Amino acid sequence: MKIIALDLGDRWTGIAISDPLRIIARPLETVETKKLVSFLTDLLAQEKIETIIVGYPKTLRGTESAQTKAVIAQFEKLREKFPQASWLLWDERLTSKHAQKLAKGTRESKLLVHARAAALILTTYLGSLSDQ
């Protein structure tokens, strides 16, 4: 079964997906956050998703910001809406900045930054699985 990662934002959410063996993470898509429930409904109907990882935006000092609290609230709503999957918050510090460095500057690339950030979140999670 596959794992997906979400880089939740106020306007855009990046989504990444693993391969069935849970070795490789790849950017899947960036969707408007207001359309995320519809997107996840379709994705979960099409793919065998076991776990959904959500980027947990702690500050560099490890504290919670207003954005952290907003993500936690959205995480709880999504977990209630899609109980068929396991849900996990995962530290995402610096993933968005790293993904921005990979962008080429076009509008399309700017939207892909969110999906790339989700792929970086998923990559770190998959790496932790192989360490076990």
Image (spheres, rainbow, N blue to C red):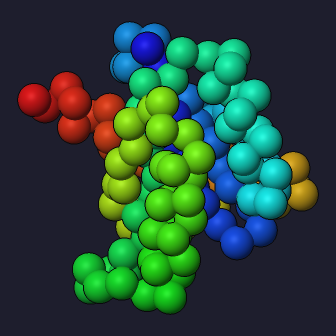
**98, above or below 64, in the image:** above
Looking at the image, which is closer to me, 101 or 46? 46
**Placement of the C terminus among the 4 image quadrants:** top left
Question: Toward which corner of the image does residue 96 lie, by quadrant?
Answer: bottom right
Looking at the image, which is closer to me, 128 or 66? 66
Percent coordinates x, y for residue 103 in the rendering: 71, 54
- Residue at (77% x, 68% y) in the render: 11
- Any part of residue 56 in sight: yes
Question: Toward which corner of the image does residue 130 lie, by quadrant?
Answer: top left
- Residue at (22% x, 37% y) in the render: 128
- Give left or right: position of 49 versus 109: left
**116, above or below 111, in the image:** above
Percent coordinates x, y for residue 104 in the rendering: 77, 53
- Give left or right: position of 40 versus 78: right
Furthest-right residue in this view? 107
**73, above or below 17, in the image:** below
- Residue at (76% x, 39% y) in the render: 39
- Residue at (32% x, 32% y) in the render: 126
Percent coordinates x, y for residue 28 in the rendering: 68, 33
Q: How many marks?
A: 0
Looking at the image, which is closer to me, 55 or 71? 71
Percent coordinates x, y for residue 34 in the rendering: 80, 60
- Any part of residue 18 in sight: no
**Placement of the N terminus among the 4 image quadrants:** top left
